[in-house]
Image: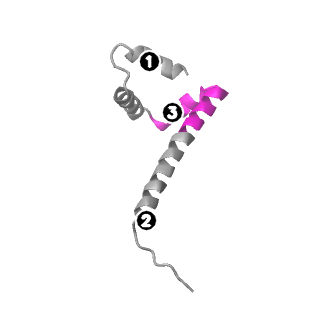
Amino acid sequence: MKLVDELFDLYRNKLTGDEEDIDMLTFAFLEEMSREDLLGIIRDMDEQELYDLIGLYLIESLKVKFAQEEYGQRRNNNTFHPRNIH
């Protein structure tokens, strides 16, 4: 993706490339972008880049959802739930 290449080239010698730096760079970039700017980037993507973007979004979002549900299940499992015995 052209944008990733440009950001990498711009910051490759300024950052260590660890997760914290990448998060900081990403959030700083997004903070400066408008919705229209982001939609323009998406319009310029080829089909594979668009699939990769949506795929990554789905993977990360589902990880969060499943992690939240697992936390909720563990929390709820510690709560006493009486059963109806007939």
**What residue does disc 1 label?**
8
Pick the residue in front: 35 or 19. 19
Quadrant occupied by the N terminus = top right
Pick the residue in front: 52 or 74. 74
The mark nearer the N terminus, 3 or 1, is: 1
Residue pushed farthest right? 47
Question: What residue is rendered at 43% in x and 14% in y?
Answer: 9
The answer for how far apart the CA atoms under marks 2 and 3 are is 40 Å
The label nearer to you, 3 versus 1, is 1
Spot occupied by residue 84 in the image (x, y as percentages of width and height): 52, 82
For the record, the magenta segment spans 34-57
Checking the image for residue 76, the label placed there is 2
Give the overall secondary structure of the magenta segment: helix
**What residue does disc 3 label?**
38
At label 2, the amino acid type is Asn
The mark nearer the N terminus, 2 or 1, is: 1
Left or right? Give the position of 9 relative to 41: left
Mark 3 nearby-residue class (10 Å; few <14, some 14–19, many ≥20): few
Spot occupied by residue 81 in the image (x, y as percentages of width and height): 45, 74
Per the image, label 1 sits on a secondary structure element best described as helix
Colouring rule applied to residues:
one colour
Question: What residue is rendered at 57% in x and 31% in y?
Answer: 42
Pick the residue in front: 84 or 53. 84
* Res 22 → quadrant: top left
> On screen, 6 above or below 55?
above
